Amino acid sequence: MKTILNNIKGDKVIWAVVFLLSIFSVLAVYSSTGTLAFRYQSGNTEYYLIKHLGILLLGFVLMYLAHQVKYKYYARISQLAIYVSVPLLAYTLMFGTNVNEASRWYTLPLINLTFQPSDFAKLALIIFVARLLAKKQENIEDFKKGFIAILLPVLLITLLILPANLSTAAMIFITCLVLMFVGRVRLRYILALVGIGLVSMALLIAIVINVPQLGKRVGTWQSRIENFKSGDSDGNYQVEQAKIAIANGGFTGRMPGNSTQKNFLPHPYSDFIFAIIIEEYGLIGGTLVVLLYLVLLFRAIKIVIRSPRNFAAFLTFGVAFSLVFQAMINMMVAVNLMPVTGQTLPLISMGGTSIWFTSISIGIILSVSREVEEEIQKNDKQPKQPEHAVV
């Protein structure tokens, strides 16, 4: 254990945040999977606990390995990853495993493991955009050499994700826009792109609505938005149950394992796990979870400020913003501030590949932090040149 602790580098606060989020994850998943256990595992409630612990343990291993890799290598890896993402997303869109009328899952042959290629593509795209921003700083204000060159891969990836997963496509697109703004791309280009995107989305929805064969997913999007606007309890079953859970939690909560709404919420272990956390740990527990994600973002921004190179800064900010942005979306859905999106709560919701890609993402942040700390320590050890008196 001492050897492992000595080899753990990077921001210790981020390591602590990850550890605390993992504790919340284990407790909340174990509490909220009782219905699943009785439905599929003959009441064996430990099955999902052990499975989730194994997934988290592998996640920590991936995080440790990722933080040991020099961050500059991720720029090269992203070049290969982005080219793999395109055919993988296209294949999944056409032939992937269909869930809820959307082909967003890919089943790996032989091992029969399913994962969402959008998780892989999201991370690959953020690293790739960070690389392009760092590489094109001299021409960043040029429309063709700067803006268009960065925009093309963003549009390609988001358009391939969009038909099956609107919320993920929108989240990736917004993350890249924010990253482009931080990377000094001209604001008028970004605002023009946002305007074009909104108009294009409206036209796309209008076209698909008039073509019944293509309108299944659009119908789902439309019903979610309409239900959110109307507040009709009949069309907002998940949200209504989440509200009851939050109301039951009060200030201090019902204590671990005492949630009742976990038996009524369709996905209490993933999409609406934040509502279960509030029911069992109250406003105190919910606030602590929010603060942990904000601390993660704050520490990442601190790493960005201390980073001596553009790629390190853009990479850290892009990955951290993506994770915290997704967390905020999940929690806003749970408290009915947004329509239902299906986004999980990073590092807390039950899942396999989503937790692993989240772990790799945090490992990348820690990799940058580790090298920044080593560089600062190296500079501090170098003897300072004596100052010459001015005569």
Image: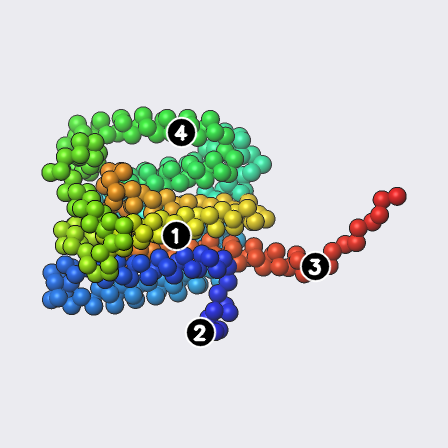
Q: Which residue is mark 1?
A: 292
x%, y% of residue 83? 40, 47
Marks 4 and 1 sit apart, C-alpha to C-alpha, by 33 Å
Q: Which amino acid is tagged 4?
A: Leu
Q: CA distance from mark 4 to mark 3?
A: 47 Å
Per the image, the residue denoted by label 2 is 1
Q: Nearer the viewer, residue 332 or 249?
A: 249
Q: Which residue is mark 3?
A: 382
Quarter occupied by the N terminus: bottom left
Dividing the picture into quadrants, the one containing residue 195 is: top left
Instruction: Give the crowd class for mark 3: few <14, some 14-19, many >=20 residues within 10 Å.
Output: few
Sequence-first tag of 4 and 1: 4
In front: label 4 or label 1:
1
Which label belongs to residue 193?
4
Q: Secondary structure at mark 1?
A: helix
Which one is in front, 46 or 155?
46
**Earlier residue among tags 2 and 3:** 2
Query: x, y percentage for residue 315?
Result: 48, 47
Colouring used for the render: rainbow
Element class at badge 3: loop
Q: Residues within 10 Å of mark 2 (few under 14, many from 20)?
A: few
- Mark-to-mark CA distance, 1 and 3: 36 Å
Q: Earlier in the sequence, mark 2 or mark 4?
A: 2
Q: Amino acid at mark 1?
A: Leu
* Mark 2 secondary-structure assignment: loop
